[in-house]
Amino acid sequence: MLGEQTDNSVSISLLDRAATLRHVVETGCSVARFGDGEMYFALHGLRWGFKGINFQKPNRHLTRILNEILERSIDRLLVCYNNQFMQEDNYKIVLDYERNPSKEYSEYLSIKRDKDIGVLRRERQRKIYNRQFETLRKKTFNRLFGDATFFILCFYFEEYIQNRILEICDLYRKMLDGKNILIVAPEKPVLGVSFRQLCEQGIIRSPERVEFISIPEKNCFEYYEQLLLRIESCRWADTVLVQAGPTATVLAEKLTSSHGITTYDVGTWNVSLQKAAQIHGITF
């Protein structure tokens, strides 16, 4: 827990990454994540000249739904923001689990071996995240926010130095174990191997059942209604994983509020599972 932020009578609790993961496992809630792209859409998507983001072109309806999710309190849905990034000027990245090895780091630390940690200096970004949250605080009825990066294993620096990464992996496994899972994701994700490949390679093996709906790599919201109908037809699924940028955030809210289906907006979780399997020889 990162603590509470209070503005007069309004108190909002912010979870850190590990606390977010434990909360999701213990409560069985769904997850809607607001990372950089989702917040950019929500805050700027109705402005003239808005150009969208790399993998989603402008859509005013999408912007309005994202704002509704940020503002409302929705039963069984944990909305996640960049909580820990509001606290940190320097991001310490565990390079074993890095999503994008081409990053240029400000410096390297040697914790368990030579240069196993990369450091990104992000003072400007921290200020942006805090300004965004101040805007959000004024209009939200949510009183609890998870951390949007809890699916990204390379950010678990404290757990790494404390030799607790396998505890995080065990919690990841519990999100899948024994579930009937529908995975809505592209066949060629931006980073890492696909979720389908993780299943074919035996890295994901604990669910009772896994099936897939393949989607485009970009502009998924153009197919939102069709996607929703296809997902709704899979009545056997008790858990849905969605890898679709801002569309995943919207689907997580819709499937939870309208159908009571546990839905995870997973982002690049495939990379974390892939890296953990390669390094530790574990499965999920």
Image: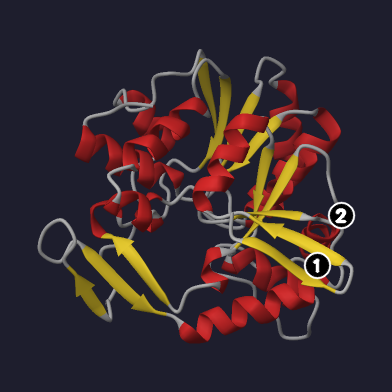
Q: Secondary structure at mark 1?
A: helix
Q: Quadrant of residue 60?
A: bottom right
CA separation in Å, label 2 and label 1: 18 Å
Residue farthest to the left? 114
Image quadrant assignment for residue 77: top right
Residue 161: image location, x then y, percent: 28, 53
Image-based side of 245 in relation to 225, left or right:
left
Please tell me which residue is depicted at 61% across the width and 54% down the height of the picture: 15
Please identify the quarter of the rendering in which residue 8 is found.
bottom right
Q: Residue at x 80, y 76 (%)?
A: 46
Marked residue nearer the N-terminal end (2 or 1): 1
Q: Which residue is mark 2?
A: 72
Visible residue check, residue 266: no
Amino acid at dot 1: Arg
**Residue 250 image position (x, y, % from top left):** 73, 49
> What residue is rendered at 69% in x and 76% in y?
132
Quadrant of the image for the N terminus? bottom right
Q: Position of residue 26 (x, y in %)?
A: 62, 30
Residue 156, above or below 118? above
Amino acid type of the residue tagged 2 in the rendering: Arg
Which residue bears the numbered disc 1?
60
**39 sits to left or right of 122:** right
Is there CB contact under 8 Å for labels 2 and 1? no
Q: Nearer the viewer, mark 2 or mark 1?
A: 2
Relative height, residue 48 to residue 78 (above, below): below
Front residue of this view, candidates 87 and 265: 87
Q: Looking at the picture, how far across and down is residue 211, in whole percent?
A: 53, 22
| Res 281 label | none
Q: Can you see residue 20? A: yes
Colouring:
secondary structure
